[in-house]
Every structure is written in C-alpha cells, then in structure tokens.
Image (spheres, rainbow, N blue to C red):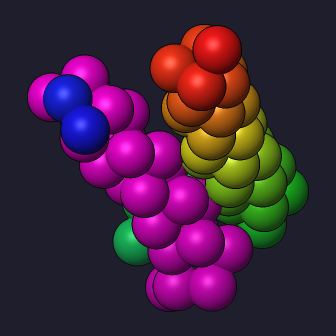
Amino acid sequence: MGLSEIANTAMAIVYLACGTFLLVGKNIFNFSDFQKIGLGCLLVLYGLFRIYSLLKKRKQQNDKNED
C-alpha cells in the first residue's frame, strides 16, 4: 500500500467523520438545520465515493497483477 492510498483512505475517513459530526453533533458552526443536514449529507456521500473509487482502483490493480 503506497503513500497515496494511505492519504486517500485517510481523507475519505476525514470526510465521513466530518459529515457524521455535522449530522449528529451539536451546531457549533451556527448553521441552520437545512445547511447542517445538507452539508453533512454531501460530506458523507463524498467520503463514500472516495472509498468506492479507492476500492475500485485497488481491484483493477489486483486484476492487472493476476494477468
């Protein structure tokens, strides 16, 4: 696992954690409920997208190495 994979995984976790905090945590940023839920959902979805693309890339590399 290279440095870029570690960084991509870490950033995906950060996006998921920030989105979850916005959805579940206290409103410390003075957002309205609509803004808090919207931004939280966007961050969680983007974190999931990054994990999906990371796993897809890893699967392609494994398939390439098997050939």
The spot of residue 53 in percent (x, y) is 66, 29
The spot of residue 4 in percent (x, y) is 25, 23
Q: How many marks?
A: 0
Q: Depth check: give the residue in front, 18 or 11.
A: 11
The spot of residue 38 in percent (x, y) is 80, 49
Farthest left residue in view: 3
Q: Is residue 26 above or below residue 19?
A: below
Q: Depth check: give the residue in front, 26 or 32.
A: 26
Q: Depth check: give the residue in front, 61 or 29.
A: 61
Report whether 37 appears left or right of 4.
right
Q: Is residue 21 magenta?
A: yes
The spot of residue 46 in percent (x, y) is 67, 37
What residue is shown at x 52% (from left), y 85% (from top)?
A: 25
Farthest front residue in view: 67
What residue is shown at x 20% (from left), y 29% (from top)?
A: 2
Report whether 55 appears left or right of 6.
right
The quadrant in which residue 37 appears is bottom right
On the question of residue 26 being in view, the answer is: yes
What residue is shown at x 15% (from left), y 29% (from top)?
A: 3
- Which is the main secondary structure of the residues drawn in magenta? helix
Q: Is residue 15 above or below residue 30?
A: above
Report whether 13 appears left or right of 64.
left
Q: Is residue 25 above or below residue 48?
A: below
What residue is shown at x 32% (from left), y 32% (from top)?
A: 5
Q: Which quadrant of the rendered structure holds the N terminus?
A: top left
Q: Depth check: give the residue in front, 14 or 9.
A: 9
The quadrant in which residue 24 appears is bottom right
Q: Is residue 19 magenta?
A: yes
Q: Residues in magenta?
A: 3-26
Q: Which quadrant of the rendered structure holds the C terminus?
A: top right
Q: Is residue 40 above or below residue 21?
A: above
On the question of residue 53 being in view, the answer is: no
